[in-house]
Image (cartoon, rainbow, N blue to C red):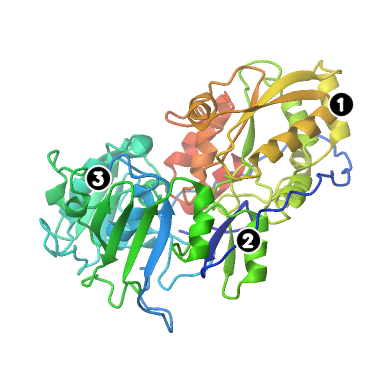
Amino acid sequence: MRVQRTWAGLGVAVLLMPACASAATPAPTLAPSSKSTPLPAARFTPTPAPTPTLAPTPAPVPTRAPAGPKLGGVARHPQRTDPPTWDPSKETVDPVGTSKYLVFSKLFTRWSDPPQNCQGEIYPWVVNRWRWLSDTVAEFTLKPGVTYQKKAPANGREMVASDVVASFQRFRNVPFMKVQSDKVDSVTATDKYTFQMKTKFPWGGLVTEMLAFQYGVWVEPAEITGPDWDWSTDPPKAWVGSGPFILKKWVPAVKWTFERNPDYWVKGKPYLDGVEYLVMPEASVHMAALRSGQLNAVRDLSEPMIDELQKRFAGFQVIRCPGGSTSGAGALWMNNSGPPFSDVRVRRAVSMAIDRQAVISSLYSSKAANVHIVAPSMQYALALQDFPPEMRQFLEYHPDRAKQFLAEAGYPAGFETTITFSPRYAAPAPMVAEAVAGMLGAVGIRAKINMMEYTRYVDYVVGAKYSVGEMAISPVDATTPEGALSLASFYSKTPGGRNRSLVNDPEYDKLFERFVSSTNDQERTTLARQL
């Protein structure tokens, strides 16, 4: 089970010394790249899928420590708000999301030990081995010796299979993951360390799309999974996990403190004495706190800020990895449920009118990349050169062809539309929207910019309620290792999906059903390519 990493919208991990930075410099003027030669239209015939076989058992995660770790210290990071709830089975995003990695354990992880830069593998975490017994039954065995923190009610006891059963029952209540959890018929402990998961139908994404997903199942002691467990009154008491840190203190609206778990089951870990999250609502304060040494790391650094920090301070490190989502600029969605975007020629015209490389070079200092359907860090992503030429042309910059398509569709003088977006997703978002609108205007599509407050934006765009004839920009959150969430959620009428362009393609839906039901890696790859 492997996740192939290539180039994408870049995520940046930063290890910082106390530093200061000047204000971001303005983005350079956007200039279109050279026009490409028009290509002929033709048809792409997908290759047939091979016969399914059972999935191989993944290798266990290594536990050897990297050479020469520096021990001790407390890492301080900002969080913009307190959690709306401390219940780890109800809250999936920050600030609870990152905190769970410190206190609890997952069945699978996407990080090795010792860690590697930009890796994309899936590793068992507390699982020792697993296998498919049939197309609908998978068997998992836990590692012996995984112990909980020495806090009541677990009191340092060993993790067992019945804990996973109880944790999954709580996991079923997570609204964001209900589509995935509803595919599971039952979870049964068959001995002390072994449990079986039975799916309602063949589902090859059981591990990659649910158990290894960042919002997937976190294992908690069975004793704390009852309905009377009060998470919000005393989180340090309620959070009992098997992770490397223990939640020791919560000061509302100020900070929460994690201390090293001295009995962590991975010997010699963790290296830090503790982690602190400081509540700082304003992003503008984060850089000042970094300069003063109050913080060790910040998020949402712009490229000019990163460049300035690298020039000024020795020890400032930047590791660039392919992104699992395109949160910086996102995808341009078109409401397909009525004209003009219900006409494929209009959608092709929009795509061919946009000079993606000009956006990347001018607004992202050439430190991002174009995404084609699935974020390139995902297993099933295709690079531009992987598409047949007759399809590749629609993902390239051909403004003259775009005008021809508009004329053929009955819009020789173009038409008016609106592009709605939220500035929440990284600083270049307004400039990206303006650049796209300018390029569309050059072929006759007159787009008005509509910057919307985030709460309204979520309902209007993410909920696909923007009007017929309108467009929207939003991230492609391809955070599942395979990227199958992108294939289904954005282009299929699959229940629970986020079909933001309101695509209605029965042929695609049938193909996706075949993809979902396959438990064979090779067949899934072939079907994903066809999708």
Residue 29 image-quadrant placement = top right
**Residue positioned 54% across, 29% down in the render:** 453
In this picture, residue 119 sits left or right of residue 313:
left
10 Å neighbourhood of mark 1: few (<14), some, or many (≥20)? some
Q: Which residue is mark 2?
A: 306
Residue closer to the observer: 353 or 529? 353
10 Å neighbourhood of mark 3: few (<14), some, or many (≥20)? many
Whole-angstrom CA distance, mark 1 to mark 2, is: 42 Å
Earlier-in-chain disc, 2 versus 3: 3
10 Å neighbourhood of mark 2: few (<14), some, or many (≥20)? some
Earlier-in-chain disc, 1 versus 2: 2
The residue type indicated by label 3 comes to Phe
Q: Which residue is mark 1?
A: 404
* 2 or 3: mark nearer the eye: 2
Q: Is residue 86 visible?
A: yes
Q: Position of residue 392 (x, y in %)?
A: 75, 42
Whole-angstrom CA distance, mark 1 to mark 3, is: 54 Å
Which quadrant holds the N terminus?
bottom left
The residue type indicated by label 2 comes to Ile
**Residue positioned 24% across, 45% down in the render:** 168
Q: Is residue 120 visible?
A: no
Q: Position of residue 220 (x, y in %)?
A: 21, 53
Q: Which residue is mark 3?
A: 168
In this picture, residue 432 sits left or right of residue 323:
right
Whole-angstrom CA distance, mark 2 to mark 3, is: 41 Å
User: Tag 2, which secondary structure?
Assistant: helix
Q: Position of residue 399 (x, y in %)?
A: 85, 34
Earlier-in-chain disc, 1 versus 3: 3
User: Tag 3, which secondary structure?
Assistant: helix
* 1 or 2: mark nearer the eye: 2
- Residue farthest bottom in this picture: 68
